[in-house]
Image (tube, grey):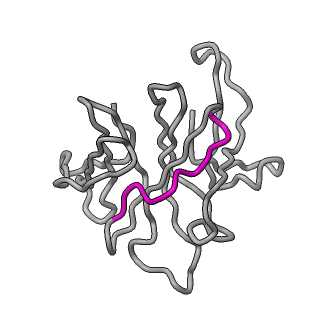
Amino acid sequence: LYFQWFPLDNKHNQWFDHIGVSISHDGGNIWSERKGVSLSGVPCTVFGSRTRPMDPCALTLSNGSIRLYFTLEPFRPSKKFLGDAQIHSAISNDGRSFTYEKGVRFAINDIDLRDPAVVFFQGKWHLFLPDQKNRGTGYYATSPDGLNFERQQNVRVGDDGNWLGHAT
């Protein structure tokens, strides 16, 4: 179970607003203590000194590894521009230690993207992201490999709907 973690205790304070994980080995009856997800291999030019991955979406791949999609926004308040927040990914064999997969999975010029939801369906990967400025509208992209996404026509839900969540 991956989540945006906001721990209130001092023991886990370094993980505040980072990706956390809790693991069950018995079908969800007992869960491990919550821990922060470690991410290695992110270039300094992408990650920056104070940036952190956020907004996780995890999928189990056919080989048993886990791909984690997440938002990464370089921490540059004096040089921030729209389009900084982009979707990236990392891979893991144990569900806790992830290795960054080189490159941006999805970006749109002049638009900050957050909160990815990804699903593999009918032979391709489908990525959905809420349009933060237009409720009920979501950005949509597809990929043959889960790494290189191509933007498709935006999708809509009811007027008050929101694309924040998970795709199944």
Quadrant placement of the N terminus: top right
Q: Main secondary structure of the magenta part?
A: strand
Identity of the residue drawn at 52% across and 61% down:
72
Q: Quadrant of residue 52?
A: bottom right
Identity of the residue drawn at 61% across and 64% down:
43
Q: Is residue 85 above or below residue 119?
A: below
Residue 42, image x, y percentages: 61, 59
In the image as oriented, which residue stretches furthest toward the bottom?
A: 78
Identity of the residue drawn at 43% across and 62% down:
86
Q: Is residue 135 above or below residue 144?
A: below
Residue 168, image x, y percentages: 33, 30
Q: Is residue 144 above or below residue 78?
A: above
Which residue range is magenta in the image? 95-107
Q: Quadrant of residue 122?
A: top left
Identity of the residue drawn at 68% across and 70% down:
49
Residue 65, image x, y percentages: 54, 31
Q: Quadrant of residue 108?
A: bottom left
Counting the numbered discs, the total is 0
On the rendered structure, is 56 left or right of 120?
right
Magenta span includes 96: yes
On the rendered structure, is 15 left or right of 45?
right
On the rendered structure, is 35 left or right of 78?
right
In depth, the one of 25 and 163 nearer the eye is 25
On the rendered structure, is 140 left or right of 129?
left
Magenta span includes 152: no
